[in-house]
Amino acid sequence: MTNNPPNLDLDIQAAMAADGDHVWHHLAQHKPLDGKAPMMVVEGKGMRVWDASGNEFLDAVSGGVWTVNVGYGRETIAKAVYEQLVKMNYFANSMANVPGALFAQRLIEKMPGLSRVYYSNSGSEANEKGYKFVRQLAAMKNGGKKHKILYRDRDYHGTTITALSSTGQIQRKDQYGPFTPGFVEVPHCMAYRSPNGDDPDFGVQAAREIEKVILAEGPDTVGSIVLEPITAGGGVITPPEGYFETVQEICHKYGVLLHIDEVVCGMGRTGKWFGYQHYNVKPDIVTMAKGVASGYAAISVTATTEDLFSEFLAGPEESLSYFRDISTFGGCAGGPAAALENMNIIEQENLLQNVTDMGEYFMGRFGELKDKYQVIGDVRGKGLFMGLELVKDRKTKEPVAESVTAGVAADCMKQGVMIGRTNRSFETFNNTLCLSPALICTKDDADQIVDAIDNALGHVQI
Ligand SMILES: Cc1ncc(COP(=O)(O)O)c(C=O)c1O
């Protein structure tokens, strides 16, 4: 860890005190903080951030929750946002604005088969729009039927009560019920923990489990299924061979809309613009948020097909049959201005290729760590999105306790490297270390990250 003090002054001490007194932090247990602020991040540049004491950290999780895809300190994004804000910062999105129109066009160019973009400003909200499409379609076209939405064990779709209702993480949901009716869980598709052992056909079988749920619920009651292309906070779960292709076939067979939640994978994280583009699927709804503007502005998108959009083209006599939804801050013009420049950077710096190359490099190095440490049960991922599942015993696959992954992350932090981990999501499976460095990651950065994990695993007590 190097000492490279940013512009520290008394204001930071005052801000730390104010934080300790007044801020209620996300996902934080405040008692151990004892009225003090948690680490205050005061500066960021590229892949690195500095705390209020001037300590430098290499951020391997893009702002903690896989968000800052193009890295910190991007002046061109800040300028694009500044110029847009002084010209026209906001008008409700029932009117048009220039960056909103231009970003929609650029985005749709990357998503063949989709044609419409609906703006809001968080991943949860983007998903809720997708759910509202389904509920309204059920009301308008199917006499209220086809209103059910399927979601998958281990997936996360957001923090609001309805987004949580569609989340397959028991600890995230615990104590927040009762939940919104009409959401039905289907089994996960994690090959490492397949109930059928190492069956090469597991992908198809896992998808067939979805079909069983559709048949049990009644196909005329099921409107859509929401899936992460690669499950993120649920343990970085890559889909097995044949999974998505079979899901697509089942969706067509039963008239179920396919909603892909790209809130984490979207905008280059896996080496393609979107995670689903690795698989042979044509989604009806795609949601995205975090990497869309890399955290330089709050923006989220619910993208759909022209077919779905046309269902809402009611005539004036049907006064309620259009999408009667508004997101106040979906009209902030700074969001799409930031998103346009974010996309320019990804293209100009050829970052999708970098993600693919660096992802392969990481996988090679993690393979070496797996040979060295029995505690690594499985290494998964795509592009710069990776997970290491830790187990007590490779044969039984018994997961390590959450305190073990917490200890590894804390040890890396002491070495100046921030890594992530699944936390408080499941009763037993909070056992995966998560990595999602910015798309600009170099080989040297990758080595620093892997070396820190190597050192930490050398000390770990199981
Ligand atoms: C896959 C996925 N979907 C949705 C969300 C919710 O996004 P937000 O926190 O912006 O509401 C998240 C957040 O982590 C996520 O990982």
Image (tube, rainbow, N blue to C red):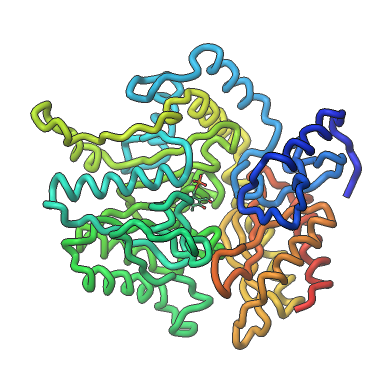
Residue 272 in view here: yes
Quarter holding residue 415:
bottom right
Where is residue 9? Give x, y as percent: 87, 28
Please, which residue is most extreme toward the right here? 3
318, above or below 85, in the image: below
Depth check: give the residue in front, 382 or 461. 461
Question: Which quadrant of the figure contains the C terminus?
Answer: bottom right
Q: Would residue 263 appear left or right of 327 to someone viewing this image?
A: right
Q: Would residue 400 appear left or right of 373 to someone viewing this image?
A: left
Depth check: give the residue in front, 324 or 259. 324
Tally of numbered tags: 0
Q: Residue at x 54, y 52 (%)?
A: 270
Depth check: give the residue in front, 317 or 297. 317
Q: Residue at x 72, y 65 (%)?
A: 406
Q: Residue at x 47, y 79 (%)?
A: 194
Where is residue 247? Give x, y as percent: 32, 64
Depth check: give the residue in front, 377 or 130. 130
Residue 280 in view here: no
Q: Would residue 419 appear left or right of 399 to someone viewing this image?
A: right
Quarter holding residue 250:
bottom left
Where is residue 400? Give x, y as percent: 66, 76
Where is residue 129? Give x, y as percent: 35, 43
Please, which residue is most extreme toward the left here? 317
283, above or below 92, in the image: below
Q: Residue at x 61, y 60 (%)?
A: 386
429, above or below 119, in the image: below
Q: Would residue 215 appear left or right of 291 to someone viewing this image?
A: left
Please, which residue is most extreme toward the bottom here? 395
Please, which residue is most extreme toward the top here? 87
